[in-house]
Amino acid sequence: MISVIATIKVKKDCRDSFVEVFKANVPNVLAEEGCVEYTPTIDFESGIEVQNLDDHVVTIIEKWETIEHLKAHLVAPHMLEFREKAKDFIDNVSLKILQNA
């Protein structure tokens, strides 16, 4: 099992627009072979002191059966289309690709 944490830094006042475009693509991704989970998340105000809130970040939580499934996902036609639709909302993207310890 491969876990992915994608941190998407969005431009000012673009979070809602990005999330809308992202959610429209979620059913396509969930239908991909090997996709276990694919969820956009935003910060939740918890009142816990160590939490670092950021209204300009959308964190994507993903799980894939294998790294090959993840690699296929990255070049899937619907992902290329999504990137084109979302590019004007995004400042930066970083990925953490993880395996169980």
Image: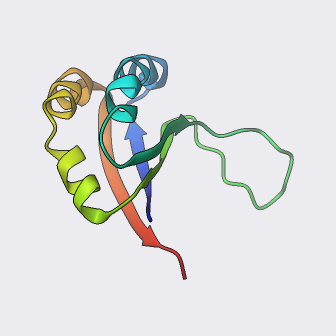
The coloring applied to the image is: rainbow
Q: Give residue 25's quadrant in the image.
A: top left
* Vertical side of 1 occupied by 7: above or below: above
* Vertical side of 72 occupied by 65: above or below: below
Q: Note whether residue 84 is visible.
A: yes
Seen at 27% across and 54% down, the residue is 69
Seen at 28% across and 64% down, the residue is 67
Who is closer to the viewer here, 6 or 70? Answer: 70
* Vertical side of 48 occupied by 59: above or below: above
* Residue 98 as seen in the image, left or right of residue 73: right
Q: Quadrant of the C terminus?
A: bottom right
In the orientation shown, which residue stands out farthest toward the bottom? 101
Who is closer to the viewer here, 91 or 85? Answer: 85
Q: Give residue 20's quadrant in the image.
A: top left
Q: Note whether residue 22 is visible.
A: no
Residue 94 x, y percent position in the rendering: 34, 56
Residue 15 x, y percent position in the rendering: 47, 25
How many numbered discs?
0
* Vertical side of 62 occupied by 27: above or below: above
Residue 99 x, y percent position in the rendering: 45, 73
Q: Quadrant of the N terminus?
A: bottom left
Seen at 51% across and 37% down, the residue is 39
Seen at 73% across and 55% down, the residue is 51
In the orientation shown, which residue stands out farthest toward the front? 33
